[in-house]
Amino acid sequence: MLTPAFDLSQDPDFLTVAIRVPYARVSEFDVYFEGFDFKFYAKPYFLRLTLPGRIVENGNEQGTYDADKGIFTIRLPKETPGQHFEGLNMLTALLAPRKSRTAKPLVEEIGASEVSEEVPDDDDEEFDWEIEQTPYAEVSGSSLNPQCHYGFGNLRSGVFQRLQDELSDVIDIKDPDFTPAAERRQKRLAAELAKFDSDHYLADYFEDEAIEQVLKYNPWWIDAHSKTKSSLGKTQEQENHAELVCFSEEEKYQLRKFVNKSYLLDKRAHHQVYYSLIDILLAYCYETRVTEGEKNVESAWNIRKLSPTLCWFETWANVHEIVVSFGRRVLCYPLYRHFKLAAKACEDTIKILQLGKAAVLKCLLDIHKIFQENDPAYILNDLYISDYCVWIQKAKSKKLAALAEALKEVSLTKAQLGLELEELEAAALLVQEEEAELKAAHSGSRQQALCSSPEAGDSEESDSTTSSGTEDSDSDSEQEELRDGQPESANSLQGPFVEESSALLIDDGGHMAVQNTGVSQGKPLASSQALGSCGALIEELEEQLKTAVQISEPQGATTGNYSSTQDRDC
């Protein structure tokens, strides 16, 4: 027979059971319900449920079948109208036979009757969260148990003795089967001190932009918890908690796959189960917040690394030491190491516990999925998470509420972590103040230098002006030297043409004549003999000057002696 997928819902007068039976023979099906029992059969499907409340057959029951979806929907009247059925989403517990809930184990240890008397939980009993302590007594080595226990309720042993090579990466402790609880704690504390990195912590402490962004994220339990504040009464608030938590089809399928178990736990084991639940939820809340609900390949590592229960098989005596241990590991192992994240994870865990076992179960199912998809972390499902998913469905909501109050009363400070955080922060702040003072002094001296820079600029300007004037005078002198240093032959050729008061005339015959105005300085005009020696040059000049070139006499010049020279062939 196959167990079909099913879902339960309720209103004040009816309990509704939706059963998905694709490809079933609809013409042949049976439904039976009376009191706490409900049974459904349609070949090849069979469903038996043990309900949390009584139902009755009074003629108001209804049933429909959706052929397209293959879903039977059956509405069953409640024996007491208005009664709220608690735990309708605890599918594993609903599938368990009713007798198995109260039946005593078939095999009991003789002389352990006090254990069986403490197993049943009384809702009216006040739950004490302090473990009973006994005086230390020396025990001989021969009476010691060679194997140590761990796992859910400390019910497992010998697992890692067989699988040490395969599972060495899952846990931090070596040889857990032969390491007592006290030695585990000493090694854990030493490993945390060795792993703590002050530079990493201070970097996250001062550069906390990413931390603040993570702290603003609101996971699903924040919204669910805020909705409960609008409830009118305490009873109605407790009833609405389960309805605010919804399970996906994948989660419902996983619940149906779990094997229902009964756990024989004494009072000390019960305390350890609740304490370890807090530790696991703290690690899960941190992981969900820093990844903002988006799981990644490091999610399984983060959860098991932040939970001493999972990686050191730690046992606890009170809630305070759980919180302190979690705070230390937050500052030693993950990417974001900030004290505010540890405090925020505590607040998230309190809200989950206040929402009831449905919210706790949803978190455990998510952890189960994360570990199942990670190799070799899946072994932690067998040791802890699967048993927690089955056990929490039968847990009392009152115990979870009391556990939330115990966690709420715990105050975590940096001094309690034993990592000298306050001293590190004070030293870092002192260094920052010194650097700020040095920077201020450097900027002041620089500003002082800038204030005195105009005088230096004026002197530089005067120096540059002087140097430029010197360069100008030097350049002028160089030009004069160049002019003075021209060859005499050039002066002898240019002499007849550059005198200020001379004029050059061309007569009708094409002969050139130089007219002296009498104001020439220096030597007299060149003789005809000198001109004759340069006849070739003069002939060339005549050809150029025939284009009507004439230099007129300057105004104001007095008439002087005239001399004319005719060209002669030399």
Image: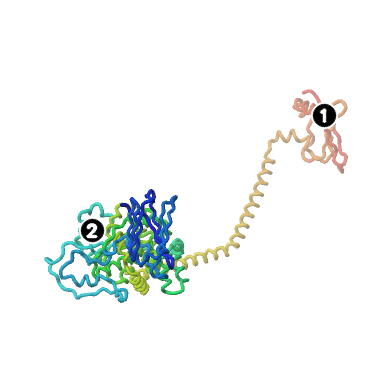
Task: Please provide percent x and percent y for residue 344.
Answer: 40, 67
Tell whether 45 sits left or right of 265.
right
Q: Mark 1 highlights which residue?
A: 547
Examine the rendered structure and indicate whether residue 521 appears above or below residue 564.
below
Task: Please provide percent x and percent y for residue 54.
Answer: 35, 67
- Residue at the location (67% across, 41% down)? 482
Task: Please provide percent x and percent y for residue 157.
Answer: 21, 60
User: Which numbered disc, 2 or 1, marks the residue closer to the eye?
Assistant: 2
In the rendered structure, find residue 174 and report the number of the disc placed on it: 2
On the question of residue 268 being in view, the answer is yes
Tell whether 202 sits left or right of 466.
left
Identify the amino acid type marked 2: Lys
- Residue at the location (79% across, 36% down)? 524
Disc 2 and disc 1 in contact, CB within 8 angstroms: no
**SS type, badge 2:** loop
> Residue 19 versus residue 381: which sits nearer the camera?
19
> Residue 431 versus residue 514: which sits nearer the camera?
431
Identify the amino acid type marked 1: Thr
| The image quarter in which residue 491 lies | top right
